[in-house]
Amino acid sequence: GRAATLDDQANGPVAAGIEMGANWDEVIVSLSEDSSLAEQFVTAFGTSGITQERVVHAIARYEETLITPSPFDRYLNGDANAISDEAAAGYTAFKALGCSACHQGINVGGNLYQRFGAVQQVDIASFNVQNAQPVVKPRDQGVSMVKVPSLRNIALTAPYFHAGKIQDLPTAVRIMGLSQIGKVIPDHDIDNIVAFLESLTGDWQQHAELID
């Protein structure tokens, strides 16, 4: 949550050592050698000059177009048949358990900070050991705040959590129950909540086609 705007965020990954690890000056030289890209910059900015500021601005404006309305949106707008009965039951459970206290708003999250381990600490790695009892311990007062992620398209964005160690939604929901509300969520509720989460998978727009 360190960046206040899309432009601020778009500026970071290119030179970040743990991401692209590039050098902006070298990137600009490389991009400037692409004649077709230079023509697009003329159309967008009036001149062919490719600068860090313009690249960041263009990327941020592109990111603003990545809107993927989902079946759940149609359900909220009154189409009771837009999602399955299981997904509707999962939405009810999602709210009843208190998940919507953090995952809320138009993006079903992404607009506040919370501690991962609000009620108790959960060792994520312990969930990947077959037949092992997950390790849970009292909350550590030193747990840092993190930005609550949006749940839109969550079924497409595994692996989950900050360490990327959980591969499936049912396990992720189970961990959240223990960690954030201190409850063992029953399997049938987990199944329904996962159905609800899958209903948040958006419809691809024309500008967001998947390319092999």
Image (cartoon, rainbow, N blue to C red):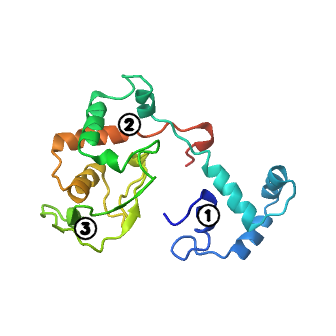
Residue tagged 2: 199
Residue furthest to the right in view is 47
Among the two numbered marks 2 and 3 on one chain, the one whose residue lies closer to the N terminus: 3
Residue tagged 1: 8
For label 3, the SS is: helix
Q: Of discs 3 and 1, which sits in the foreground?
A: 1
- Residue 204 pos. (x, y %): 53, 38
Q: Which class describes the residues within 10 Å of circle 2: few (<14), some (14-19), or many (20+)? A: many
Q: Residue at x 24, y 39 (%)?
A: 93
Among the two numbered marks 1 and 2 on one chain, the one whose residue lies closer to the N terminus: 1
Q: Residue at x 57, y 47 (%)?
A: 211
Number of marks in picture? 3
Left or right, residue 78 beside residue 94: right
Quarter location, residue 74: top left
Q: Of discs 1 and 2, which sits in the foreground?
A: 1
Amino acid type, mark 3? Ala
Nearer to the camera, 207 or 107: 107
Amino acid type, mark 1? Asp
- Residue 100 pos. (x, y %): 33, 45
Give me the C-alpha separation between circle 3 and circle 1.
33 Å
The image's mark for residue 125 is: 3
For label 2, the SS is: loop
Nearer to the camera, 181 or 47: 181
